[in-house]
Amino acid sequence: MQTFKTIKGLREALSAERAAGNTIGFVPTMGALHEGHLELMRRALRENDCLVVSIFVNPIQFNNKEDLEKYPRVLEEDSKILEDIGCQYLFAPDVDEMYPEPYKSEYDFGLLSEVMEAAFRPGHFNGVAIVVRKLFEIVEPTTAYFGEKDFQQLAVIQQLVKMFEMSVKIIPCSIVRENDGLAMSSRNVRLTAHERQLAPKIFQTLQKAKKLRNVLSPEELRRWTREELDAVEDFNIDYVEIAEDQQLQPFQHWNDASGAILFVALFLGKVRLIDNVRIF
Ligand code: PAF
């Protein structure tokens, strides 16, 4: 595996791949790699001639200073994992390489900018969009892979790609879970042993909720889910939402949507966790 800290170095290596007619699969990450990331990478390796992984803890997408400071940074371990799975290129720039100038772009993702993560983490998706657009311009991938745990991020990136008519194909990948159902996340390592025991209750509740679709209205199901989660010691809920699966807007009647997803975001101690399940 070749590791690049500079945009120039990576661009040169990838232009040789392109000249050889090779397709480039890309998995952007912030590191602290787990099985969820590896699933994206294995798929990218199967579907492309080479794999580029970026590891960059993007400061401008954090709206919480402590979350940015505490975000796990384990580049050496991550590099070994990437070698083992057969990744060809690691791009691990520092902040000055990515942002030599302060970044000023403002993106408007319409309705997607008004709900859930966008409402609770102001500026977050603007920071994600800035870095992902820049990474796409550097890597020029054929395909890029994103996990559905960050479902709203995925929708924002799909809209970004449409807005700028980028040629990259975005591949959504299913959530990867621990054996007890907890959605894999780099932040999970920050949970205490006690919090780690409570965390699977999120997915357990979402699964129970899914089964109540035939007896409760969307509003009643939202309320039921919220009450179940609220009853768990140490859960501090940001939101519970049932939204249609395109612009992620809440709706009143099951017939109003062609696909529906139940979303949750909550703090468990100091760690913010998100999860979702498709209801239909
Ligand atoms: O999902 C993530 O890890 C990040 O938001 C991403 C897409 C790598 C952008 O920094």
Image: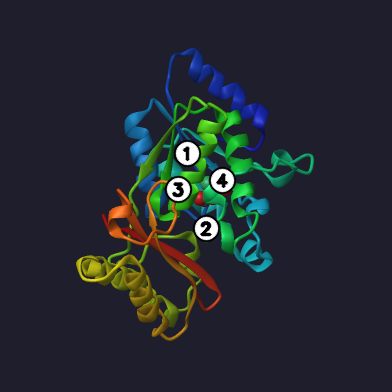
Dot 2 amino acid type = Val
- Confirm if mark 3 falls within 8 A of ligand 1: no
Q: Position of residue 252 (x, y in %)?
A: 36, 62
Q: Which residue is mark 4?
A: 110
Residues at discs 3 and 2 in contact (Cβ within 8 Å)? no
Is residue 32 shown above or below 189?
above
Residue 228 lies left or right of residue 247; in this view the side is left
> Is the Cβ of the residue at disc 1 closer than 8 Å to that at disc 2?
no
**Residue drawn at point x = 51 percent, y = 32 percent:** 162
Give how far apart the Cα atoms at labels 1 and 2 are: 17 Å
Q: Quadrant of residue 66?
A: bottom right
User: In the structure shown, which secondary structural element does the residue marked by tag 2 occupy?
Assistant: loop
Q: Is residue 132 above or below residue 210?
A: above
Name the N-terminal-most of marks 4 and 3: 4
Please tell me how crowded label 4 is: few (under 14), some (14-19), or many (20+) other residues with Cα within 10 Å.
few
Q: Which residue is mark 1?
A: 158
Residue 36 visible in the displayed image: yes
Label located before the other in sequence (3 or 1): 1
Few, some or many C-alpha atoms within 10 Å of disc 2 (few <14, some 14-19, many ≥20)?
A: some
Q: Position of residue 199 (x, y in %)?
A: 39, 74
Mark 1 or mark 2: which is in front?
2
For the residue with label 2, is its CB less than 8 Å from the closest atom of ligand 1? Answer: no
- The type of residue carrying mark 4 is Gly
Instruction: Tell me if 247 is positioned left or right of 254 in this view.
Output: right
Residue 30 visible to an observer of this rendering: no
Q: Secondary structure at mark 1?
A: helix
* Residue underneath mark 2: 115
Label 4 CB less than 8 angstroms from ligand 1: no
Q: Which residue is mark 3?
A: 247
Q: Amino acid at mark 1?
A: Gln
